Image: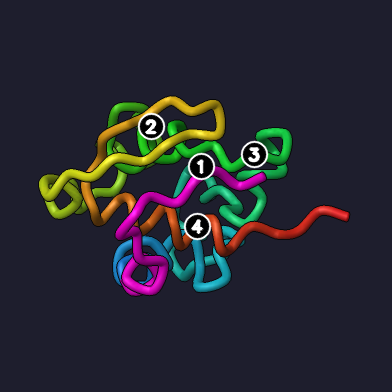
Amino acid sequence: MLGTVAAGQDAADGGLLYERHCATCHGLSGEGQGPMAGVLVIQPTDLTTLAARAGGAFPVLRVIRRIDGRDPLVAHGSPMPVYGDFFEGDDTTLETVSGQRVTTSRAIADLVSFLQTMQSVQE
């Protein structure tokens, strides 16, 4: 169970955003081996295991809060992503697995949709 995709959410657009803003640290595969990973004090998370580490359900709310800075990471020295304002505005609503609705920017919704496609399937 990966969570609900919002109407209008675009994983392809999210993939382009991911390549531009996230892959430098998390790597193209999302496994945390991007070219900047070696210089970070705290290594980037393996984004392909987010659902598995959350018990099988994609952690929509936690991911949104990490990206928009409401749940900041010390490793970044500032809210993630360091591109900040780019991910603000043009709001849309997503729904978590529990049915909770959360408002976020369309760019973040697209990133969430893309990250859901990256999840490894646990046998």
Of pointers 1 and 3, the one earlier in the residue sequence: 1
Look at label 2 and name its amino acid.
Val
The alpha-carbon separation of the residues under discs 4 and 3 comes to 13 Å
**Who is closer to the viewer here, 84 or 64?**
64
Q: Looking at the rendered structure, which numbered label has been put on residue 115?
A: 4
Type of secondary structure dominating the magenta stretch: loop
Look at label 4 and name its amino acid.
Leu
Label 4 SS: helix
The reply, left or right, for residue 87 in relation to residue 15 is left
Q: Residue 9: within the magenta?
A: yes
Of pointers 4 and 2, the one earlier in the residue sequence: 2
Of pointers 2 and 1, the one earlier in the residue sequence: 1
Mark toward the viewer: 4 or 1? 4
The reply, left or right, for residue 59 in relation to residue 10 is right
Q: Quadrant of the N terminus?
A: top right
Q: Are marks 3 and 2 in contact (CB under 8 Å)?
A: no
The alpha-carbon separation of the residues under discs 4 and 1 comes to 21 Å
List the residue tagged with mark 1: 42
Of pointers 3 and 2, the one earlier in the residue sequence: 3
Q: Are marks 2 and 1 in contact (CB under 8 Å)?
A: yes
Position above or below: 98 against 79: above
Crowding around mark 3 (Cα neighbors within 10 Å: few <14, some 14 to 19, many 20+) is: some
Q: Looking at the rendered structure, which numbered label has been put on residue 57?
A: 3
The alpha-carbon separation of the residues under discs 2 and 1 comes to 8 Å
List the residue tagged with mark 2: 74
Residue 70, image x, y percentages = 29, 27
